[in-house]
Image (spheres, rainbow, N blue to C red):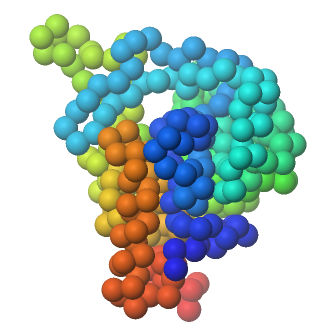
Amino acid sequence: MLTVNFLGFKLNCPLTTASGTFGYGECYQDFFDVNELGILTTKGITLEPRSGNPQPRLAEVTGGIINAIGLENSGFDQFVSDIVPTFKAFKIPVMVNLNGKTIEEYQTLAAAINKIKVIAFVELNISCPNVKAGGILFGTDLELTRKVVRAVRAVLPDKKLIVKLSPAVSDIKKFALICEEEKADGISLINTIPAMQINYQTGKPTLGNIIGGLSGPCIKPIAVRMVYEVASVVKIPIIGIGGVSCYEDVLEFMMAGASVVGIGTSIFRSPEMITEIKRKLKEYCIANNLNSIEEIIGLAQPRRKDYE
């Protein structure tokens, strides 16, 4: 009933994790069986180790948090030696979030990941600054988006390529269409929204990095709107992410056009919510006489000629 066909994989449910909120799958195994997910999405990796941004890195705000972790990770070599062997314990597809500062770095990392059999999906995070272009975010420049997706696609023939879009653009549909044109297999959206908090007692920004990324329930209406807009123009499948905290949110994203829904910040508050959401989704299907949860994908979209 909750099974979803996604890019050739038969997922046991339409749920995944949002990158950066679930480690590499090891963090929550004491709370629930990770195999209850449809896809395991890992935290981001980079070619070289990164120590991350200065502390403090988290600020709580109404309805969410602002984070500026800065992609802290131990780099690709340690990822291969210490993390990749642990993926064999999972029965579900693994999606690795990939980051780089230059197109060359993205391409080198993608080519190396292409050789790792246990990884099924690559989530290309294009919210990183392109150092050669003076720090412009790949995901906020149409031509840079095209170049990085094309470069990664060329060296990733054996993996499904999902491009994660930034919400910090005026028209996200244009970026999604470029990803589709450059042969991405799917789109995930949204990433966090640039934000900041000022400590009124000190008169200084709360975060060590000053600016961070806003996530949590407060961004859900923005994310739903962007999923709806992207689903109206692309034919490739979508992973909807942003502020999901209950089964009603999952339904909303799927009706907007998402085939899979990512859960992130809310897991911090309630690690067991995956099993609860699955139970509620099954009850919804039964109550509404659905044979499959897939029947609601794009339900809120106007009927398009392409689908007729």
Q: Position of residue 191 (x, y in %)?
A: 46, 44
Residue at the spot 27% in from the left edge and 17% down from the top edge: 206
Say if 177 sits above or below 110 in the image: below
Q: Residue at x 52, y 65 (%)?
A: 14
Residue at image point 23% right, 10% down = 204
Q: Residue most toward the left?
A: 201
Q: Is residue 258 above or below residue 184?
A: below
The residue sitting at the top extreme is 202
Q: Is residue 190 visible?
A: no
* In the depicted structure, whether residue 134 falls above or below residue 286: above
287 to the left or right of 52? left
Apparent side of residue 110 relative to residue 221 in the rendered image (left or right): right
Q: Position of residue 255 (x, y in %)?
A: 40, 73
Residue farthest to the front, as pictured: 30
Q: Nearer the viewer, residue 66 or 39?
A: 39
Looking at the image, which is closer to me, 214 or 283?
A: 283
* Residue 170 point in image, percent of width and height: 40, 49
Q: Quadrant of the C terminus?
A: bottom right
Q: Foreground residue, 286 or 54?
A: 286
Q: Residue at x 87, y 43 (%)?
A: 115
- Residue 46 in percent (x, y) is at 67, 27
Quadrant of the image occupied by residue 301: bottom left
